[in-house]
Image: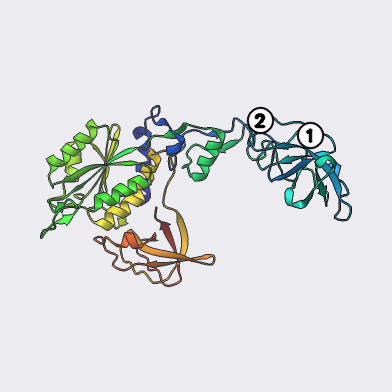
Amino acid sequence: MIALKDAQEILLRQLEHLVPKNNNLQQIALWNAGGRVLAKDIIAVENFPAFDRSLVDGFALAAEDAIGATAEKTVTLAVKDEVAAGSDVVNKLIPHTATRIFTGAPLPLGADCVVKQEEVLETTGSCNEQMIQIMQPPKKGEGVGYKGEDIAAGELLINAGTILTAAHLGVLATLGVDPVPVFKQPVVGVFSTGNELIEVDSHLRPGKLRASNIYVLSEIIRRAGGVPINLGIVPDSVEEVIKIYEEAERRAIPLVVSTGGTASGDYDVIKEAMDRFSAQRLFNKVAIRPGAPVVVSVKPKQLLIGLSGNPGGATVAMLILVYPLIAGLAGARRCLQRYQALLEQPIHYKSSFCSYFWGSYRQEGSTIIVRPLENQFCGSIKNYANSNCLIEVPGGKNIMNNEPVAILTLP
């Protein structure tokens, strides 16, 4: 048995030989880039906006032409030109006149401000010439978005390793970055062992259980940035498990995660299957509850991880140990976020192992309050669905009401 911290470090060190150094990047369409991990820094190669432009519908002019304007003594200017958004031909501002302009349109050369249309009085002069009366002096730069004001050429905008969100896609689209360089999504094989397991669409018979763990683990793999490959349900047979490992090796699947068969009973076959598959054992038990029986073995370019068959134990170990590993394979640093909270109900815990309890936290002002759920046993299948965090309790410690405790938020 090893400490949790040691197990985490051992797993993360496997990234060096599981991630292909020269073959882990790909170019994908911007349309499909949301949620993927950026593989290269994005540096702006152009300014945004690319030209000085109007931020409002109104009139472009030189601010000095409206000095001293008041409601009682307006400044009157003739409107000599008009420019709309999308115009690629923009005339120079005629001195002592105004140009009708619309939001997003390029600013005429010689203009240094835009007065909103609702802040002027539009009139008609001789020969039906359009005129505006300005009732207060504008400031230089008023109503103007300057070239490069938002994004400057040469600016580092998004760092490699960033998980791309909707906001990032907007930046990439604005700069014309398409396709987008991202890390490949790691393929992760997942299977369940157990003579008692049946497919989810099977009729439930006495002594049988539907294989739910494989679906839970697969979704955690997706949340971490990986692509789960369902390797199925395998009976409690060393030979059958070895066949699955051999299949994964043929398919060049770098990481295989299983649930079930990791304890020390007559039907717990994972450790022997790994040994006969010539995988080197890294560890076979971690000092946590639930989920202690975690078996990890390694071969060149492949890592095999066996988790408990208990729903709670498999899920907790997957979140604490395997989720960050898969995220690393995907090029990101994802892990459960840690916060301090105040415990709403006491937790009495006698084991010497660090333990994780399903909990529900809420924010009250600047304080986080967390409540442990009922039925904290390994076989529970609904607590994960009803919780939004794990409560971390050091070994051998009782935590009373209103005492601080660490919580880990769930992905």
- Tell me if mark 2 has few (under 14), some (14-19) or many (20+) residues whose alpha carbon lies within 10 angstroms of its own: few
Q: In this view, does 357 lie above or below 88?
A: below
Of residues 6 and 410, the one nearer the viewer is 410
Return the residue at label 2.
88
Outermost residue toward the front in this view: 127
Q: In which quarter of the image is residue 222?
A: top left
Return the residue at label 1.
93
- Give the residue type that dot 2 points to: Asp
Decide if residue 44 is on the left or right side of residue 265: right
Residue 211: numbered disc:
none
Of residues 131 and 372, the one nearer the viewer is 131
Decide if residue 392 is on the left or right side of residue 79: left
Decide if residue 277 is on the left or right side of residue 351: left
The residue drawn where x is 86% and y is 53% is 70
Residue 136 appears in the picture as rendered: yes
* Residue 286 position in % (x across, y down): 30, 51
- Give the residue type that dot 1 points to: Leu
Query: Across the whole image, how many numbered discs are drawn on residues?
Result: 2
The residue drawn where x is 48% and y is 41% is 162
Of residues 359 and 183, the one nearer the viewer is 183
Of residues 109 and 220, the one nearer the viewer is 109
Q: In this view, does 236 lie above or below 279?
A: below
* Residue 179 position in % (x across, y down): 46, 31
